[in-house]
Image (spheres, coloured by chain):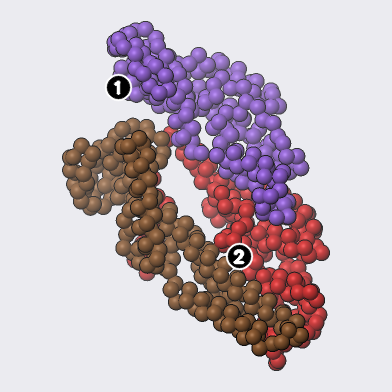
Chain colours: A brown, B purple, C red
Amino acid sequence: MFTEKAVDLLKELDRCPDTLPPYHEKMVRAVLDEMNILFEKNVEVLNSSVSDNLGEFMPVLKFRHAALERNKRCLMAYFWNRLLKIRQMRWEFGRILPPDVKSNLSEAEVNWFNNYSKILANYMKSIGQGCGLNLLQNMDPPKSLYLEVRCLADHGEIKMENGEVICLQKNHLYLLPRSACEMLIRQGILEQVVSF
Amino acid sequence: MDPAEIEFLAEKQLISIIPKFNLNHTIHLISGDIGPFRSGIPVRVPIWLAINLKQRQKCNIVVPEWMNVETLEERKENEKQSEFFTKMPNEHYMEVSRMLFETAGDEIQKIDEIRTVLKDIWDLRMSKLKASINKFIKSDTGIAQLDHLTQLEINSVRPLLPDSLNIISSLEKDQDSDGEDNSQSQNRASSSFAQ
Amino acid sequence: MKLCRSHYFDLEDILASHETMPATFTEEVKGLGFLDPGAVTDNITPKTKLELPFWILQVLLQLPNKPVTVELPKAFNATHRDIFSADACIVDFNKLCKFFYTFGKILARAKLKESPEIKKMLVETFKQRFRYVFDLSQNVETEKLASDKMDRMERELYNESRTAQVRLNQWMSVGIGTIQAASMIVNHRKRKLTVFEL
């Protein structure tokens, strides 16, 4: 049945609301092929029939056209909904995506991600009266300047704003400036320690 | 909105502290001037500063007048008697109490009793709010007036209430478009509620 | 909030319009035989009964001679409308119709002869079930399974509301929460873990 493949793409997206499933190059191509077939068949009918028996072909013409439009809508929705998630990734994973996440993106999507990253960086540089403003910081209202954190993975060295370099090792506790560790907490490398 | 954000807003309220240090000049901040500070002389400062100073043992916090068992018991009785919401002593009563309990617990007398009364008041108001929302959704009216609700209380029914109203309005409409005049203003009203 | 307005890219709207309805052809339709697995010719013969996705039926209904009559899907027929008006809360939408409100909205706007009734029923059903969704979302101790009987829209409402309630309870008991790892990252890790276990 026409449009089934396109709907399957959407069903998969719908099943994983919190993650990004791999980009299905082949399926997308198959939908595009189907669209071409639908279009060519309609052109064929229009070219071969004379205007007085056109009414007879109306139902099938209209159906194919609707199927064509619906395939288009499904593909657009597929790309658009994926882009929303990819945009969210920029805010959650940061500028660099983990390799296994990145492998789920198409080439065009990787380009889009990089361009979005660039635009966001330029914007953050331009605001804050010349000194820039990191919008990814203080996503929650800050309560203190320093946070006690536990490191969940061997992350290696990070550089502080004051130039100091700290090596983050698994299971070690650190007291770090909020600005230095907020993004790392979001990325799941550090965990904030709560004292009751 | 997150409760943390509402607490952040509540931190702007002024509170009296008794400093344990001297600072002769005024500090100019965007939100207003504070200081000078004289040891032992009460001065009004934003709560966030009071908490910061208290944590470093640079001041004592003057507990707000309403934060005592008698006053709150009275409020609780009023709330129980009244069919409607009564006015709270402070529009951020839960947030301010929580912050002071945490940092200035040593200065509040009968802190556990106060905690209990406050929780009772909150529960009373929450069940009133819940009942009136259930009634409101079932009814066909589009307007409800609820006075004296605090920001945190209003926020407790977000995003459920504004979203539900949006759903109902979209089910009632014949089209999803911005063209219709009344639907537009309705959407605006509910989306401003959702902020 | 994406909850209520359907738009061109809306997954829910597209998937809901893919829900099927029983249809009977009243006239012969040339060239559409491929829709009928039992067809012997290229055409659909009168009295053919088929279960077709809504978007296809919409095309057929818009033809000048309207060669089909449609029957409402089970969830929207007269029997179910009666059940809803008696007690909407007992209905299991997850079984009956996963996109109950979105599909219902599409039907209500499709200018069928039952459309006005469907519209009224949707609003009433939502209002009746509101309390059930509201109560469950406030009661955060119950398992997530509580949303089992809900349709997609209700479930989204429930999930959002429940998250807010959890945040509020957390704030009440321990105060301002800690900075959390982002949800996508948590999910990403969970998935990695399950792949690893397999």
Q: CA distance from mark 2 to mark 1?
A: 59 Å
What residue would you read off at disc 1? B56
Could you tell me residue A58's position as x and y percent?
A: 72, 80
Position of C112 relative to B78 (above/below): below
* Residue A108, image quadrant: bottom left
User: In the rendered view, would you say C137 is above or below B84?
Assistant: below
> Would you say C105 lies left or right of B9 here?
right
Q: Position of residue A35 (x, y in %)?
A: 55, 77
Residue at position x 55%, y 31% in the image: B151
Q: Is residue C33 left or right of residue A120?
A: right
Query: Residues at badges 2 and 1 in contact (C-beta under 8 Å)?
Result: no
Secondary structure under the numbered disc 2 in the rendered image: helix
Question: For this rendering, which residue is in front, B134 or B78?
Answer: B134
Mark drawn on residue C75:
none
SS at mark 1?
loop
Which residue sits at x=33%, y=8%? Answer: B38
